[in-house]
Image (cartoon, rainbow, N blue to C red):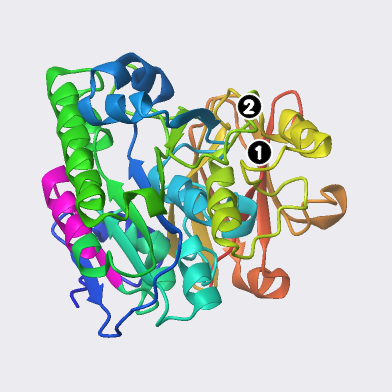
Amino acid sequence: MIYNGSDGGLYDEFNSLGEDQEYYYRSNESVKVRRSKNVILISLDGFSRERFNEFKDNLTTIGSLIDEGWTQYNVTNFVYYTQTRNGHATMLSGYLGESTGLYGNRYVYHPLPVGFSFLEKAEEEYGSGNVASAFISGKYKNIFPAFKNSMYQSLDYVHISEELPNETSGYCTDFLEEYWGCCFVAFFHFRDPDKTGHLAGEGSVEWVKSLREGDRELGDILSVFKESRVYNDTLIYITSDHGFKKNGYSHPHEPYIWLLTNDKEAKVNLDNSLIGVQDITPTICYSLDLPYDYSEPDSGHPLQVRFPDEKLEYREKFLLDKERPIIDLWGTRDTIPCLKARFSVSNDTNKLLLISDSRDVAGSVVGETEVPHGVETVTMELDRTIMRKYEEIYLLAYDAAENPSNLARIDIE
């Protein structure tokens, strides 16, 4: 096992993790049980719906899957910030930031809670000796801090490091060749086209090349299934965590993505325009008979079951938002006896409130600061006694017209 990461607070974690680090773990436990269904979830990081529709017919592997009759869903990333950490936390758990505590690459106050991911649910439900599980990612900096508690010696095959698609593909095929004879669940994550988009620009020659390379590696992985004769016994879900600004270098708010799957039962919601990334894990759990409570209006929902009206109404009212939130937490540093948080805000932010109950804003204010017009950076001191007393504190931003913006939970140990 190699782990060179930091277990420090948010500020040090974000700024100290580099691209030369990796974490890997291999279980010595043998798995021999064979079941009728296996599952693999594959994420191609930062691949927007618009670009997917533009390139899908010219990508050898993805085009062939569409020709085979795979189902394509239009998916929206309903998280506040379309970034890698929270996007994948929602993808693998079926829960938004209010439940996971992850709101973006810098909104990490703790990792994804233990037991939230479908990989862990499978291990718990079937028994560790009855299913092989894998978490393989070609990114480290924005993946390991969010998932370290979910993976640490609870899964059978873990490899996380900054690497090219062919290197990620190598670990994926290694896992499949080792465990193809038994029941398995896996998550495979490719860093491109997102990585190349940040470096060379989305839509650039380099970006298109990385897209084709990722498609080729995807084909290599799927060929292992066909050679091992478990292809027809494996449910495969291919998606992305967020989009990317067209011809740009970032994705400040790019929520429109896609899902491609061979799950023939997941076709009853094709007319639904409110499918979210939080619906992927419930779909997997439904297929594998794993526990997930999708009865609440704000929960994810399996694509094999029609969405109830109250869930669609909830998403229309609370989740459908084309604008980026006006508040962005970008750093914290421990002080004594307070935690000092620094925020970058848009120029229409008028006031910041700290509240202890998101359902009773007026009656639960524990901190307040006015934001002078034109100020872009605000510092607030969060009293540790308040944090200990209430456990959860919410940050609420108001614009000059006294309209509230999105809530962001603060959960600091």
Q: Is residue 101 visible?
A: no
Percent x, y of residue 92: 48, 54
User: In this rendering, which labeled residue sits more in front, label 1 or label 2?
Assistant: 2
- For residue 321, the mark is 2
The residues bearing labels 1 and 2 have C-alpha atoms spaced at a distance of 10 Å
Quadrant location of residue 141?
A: bottom left
Residue stretch rendered in magenta on the structure: 157-175
Task: Tell me where residue 239 sits by quadrant.
Answer: top left
Q: Nearer the viewer, residue 34 or 240?
A: 34
In the rendering, at what x and y percent does residue 376 appear? 48, 32
- On whether residue 158 falls in the magenta region, the answer is yes
Rendered view: 202 above or below 231: above
Q: In the drawing, what numbered circle is on residue 406? A: 1
Query: Does the residue at mark 1 contact the one at mark 2 (Cβ under 8 Å)?
Result: yes
Give the side of residue 294 with respect to residue 100, left or right. Answer: right
Q: Quadrant of the N terminus?
A: bottom left
Q: Is residue 370 above or below residue 137?
A: above
Amino acid marked by disc 1 = Asn
Helix, strand or loop at label 1? It is: loop
